[in-house]
């Protein structure tokens, strides 16, 4: 699961940053592990965004049968996720530069670790934004799917169940 990979990498990074913050100097191997954990973290986020995009397209193809309408909505999803991928690429570049700059002397100090953690916090905010926007898009697609037909008791009950399920997923995340 991409989300657990992201979390595992984040825990490794936070552990290393905590050690640096209390004055523990990292070995060359630990510095390499830190760089690798950062790369793993960013790769996990990239994979997760791609998975979210793919899931949205699969849902779209299931829900919308009209090819013209489906193409317009797919373009919206492509632009939506493309914007987030572009923002992540920018943050990735900034993070890589900050890490390279911090490690030029072979030592990661507390101020450098804090600056890196702040940049990574922006990536965390990006993840949160995608999650909220994705939930909103799914709720809208549920309503869109239901909007095309006159509701009967069964379709109304189904709509309520889907909305309840999505609401529970939002609560759980």
Image: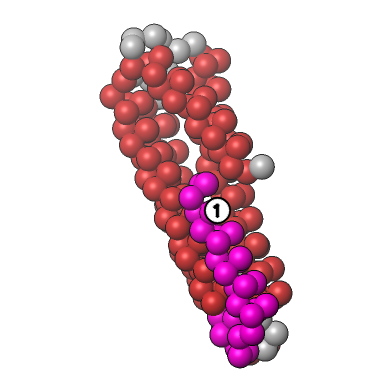
Q: Residues within 10 Å of mark 1 (few under 14, many from 20)?
A: few
Instruction: Tell me where residue 39 appears, x and y as whole percent.
Output: 55, 36
In front: 80, or 65? 65
Which residue is denoted by mark 1 in the rendering? 169
In this picture, residue 60 sits left or right of residue 168: right
Q: On screen, 28 above or below 147?
A: above
**Residue at left 61%, top 90%?**
150
> Residue 121 falls in which quadrant of the image?
top left
Tell me the residue at 37%/33% (across/down).
117
Q: Quadrant of the N terminus?
A: top right
Q: Name the residue: 71% across, 74% down.
A: 62
Furthest-left residue in this view: 111
> Residue 49, how many percent across, how many down?
56, 54
- Color style of the picture: secondary structure
Q: Is residue 151 magenta?
A: yes
Q: Quick check: 115 left or right of 37?
A: left
Q: Is residue 82 among what the camera can see? A: no
Depth check: give the residue in front, 61 or 167. 167
What is the span of residues highlighted in magenta in the rendered image? 144-173
| Residue drawn 64% across the image and 72% down it | 158
The image position of residue 137, as x and y in percent, is 51, 68
**Quick check: can you spot residue 79?**
yes
Task: Give the overall secondary structure of the magenta segment.
Answer: helix
Q: Is residue 117 left or right of residue 67?
A: left
Q: Secondary structure at mark 1?
A: helix
């Amino acid at each position: 699961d991409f989300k657990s990979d992201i979390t595992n990498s984040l825990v490794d990074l936070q552990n290393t940053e905590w050690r640096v913050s209390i004055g523990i100097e990292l070995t060359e191997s630990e510095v390499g592990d830190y760089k690798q954990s950062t790369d793993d973290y960013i790769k996990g986020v990239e994979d997760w965004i791609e998975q979210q995009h793919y899931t949205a397209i699969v849902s779209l193809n299931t829900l919308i049968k009209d090819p013209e309408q489906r193409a317009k909505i797919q373009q919206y999803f492509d632009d939506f996720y493309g914007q987030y991928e572009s923002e992540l690429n920018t943050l990735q570049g900034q993070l890589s530069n900050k890490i390279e700059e911090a490690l030029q002397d072979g030592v990661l100090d507390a101020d450098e670790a804090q600056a890196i953690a702040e940049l990574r916090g922006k990536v965390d905010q990006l993840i949160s934004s995608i999650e909220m926007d994705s939930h909103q898009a799914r709720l809208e697609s549920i309503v869109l799917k239901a909007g095309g037909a006159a509701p009967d008791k069964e379709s109304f009950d189904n709509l309520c169940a889907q909305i309840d399920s999505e609401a529970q997923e939002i609560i759980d995340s």
